[in-house]
Image (spheres, rainbow, N blue to C red):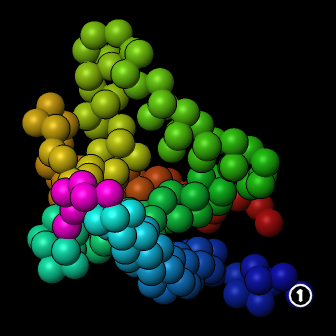
Amino acid sequence: VSTLTAVPHRARVLAAKAAVLIVVALPVGLLVSLSGFLVGQAALAGSDAPHLGLSDPQALRGMWGGGLYLTLAALFGLAIGTMIRSTTATVTTLFGTMLIVQAFAPALPGAVGDWVEKYWPSIAGGQIITGYRDPALLAPWSGLAVMAGCVAVLLTVAFIVFRKRDA
């Protein structure tokens, strides 16, 4: 018996998947962010480089924001996967949108490159974990809000597509 046979209300199925994903991804994202911070700071402290303490506001923002960023990235994947329905195509799309665009953004010409570097969801959202603030880019929480808005739009489209699609 498939999930959609047992629960024919597609919106409930997708909402439940999103809820479970949040419950799993947020604590895992927070743990990954904390672990990365502690390892990174230990390496910096050993080399006499400037480093942050756990109580530093930038460190707290980076750890909490990192967990939220990873949760949003997981929801981004859920939305894309729901719309595409192919694991290979979903992974390729996520890789392209989250990493490849980010890598090539500085090479894009003029205003297009500036816009992508400032507003592309993965770049804007990633500002939450940076210690150095580039004034040409969005502020950390504003960048995360841009990413959250894009994820909300994608999830809305995914809900619409999922409701209209045949099983």
Q: Which residues are magenta?
A: 47-52
Residue 53 position (above or below residue 81) = below
**Image quarter hosting the N terminus:** bottom right
Quarter of the figure with residue 11: bottom right
Q: Is residue 37 visible?
A: no
Q: Position of residue 65 (x, y in %)?
A: 29, 67
In the image, residue 18 sits, relative to residue 117, either above or below, namely: below
Please provide percent x and percent y for residue 148: 33, 59
Q: Which residue is mark 1?
A: 1
Indicate the quadrant where residue 6 lies: bottom right
Residue sitting at 80 percent across and 66 percent down?
167
Q: Position of residue 64 (x, y in %)?
A: 29, 74
Which element carries disc 1, helix, strand or loop?
Answer: loop
Please, which residue is most extreme toward the right here? 1
Is-magenta flag for residue 161?
no
**Percent coordinates x, y for residue 131 in the rendering:** 21, 54
Comparing 66 with 110, the one in front is 66
Please tell me which residue lies in front, 54 or 3.
Answer: 54
Q: Which amino acid is tagged 1?
A: Val
Residue shown at the point (50%, 65%) measured from the top left: 75
Judged by its main secondary structure, the magenta piece is loop
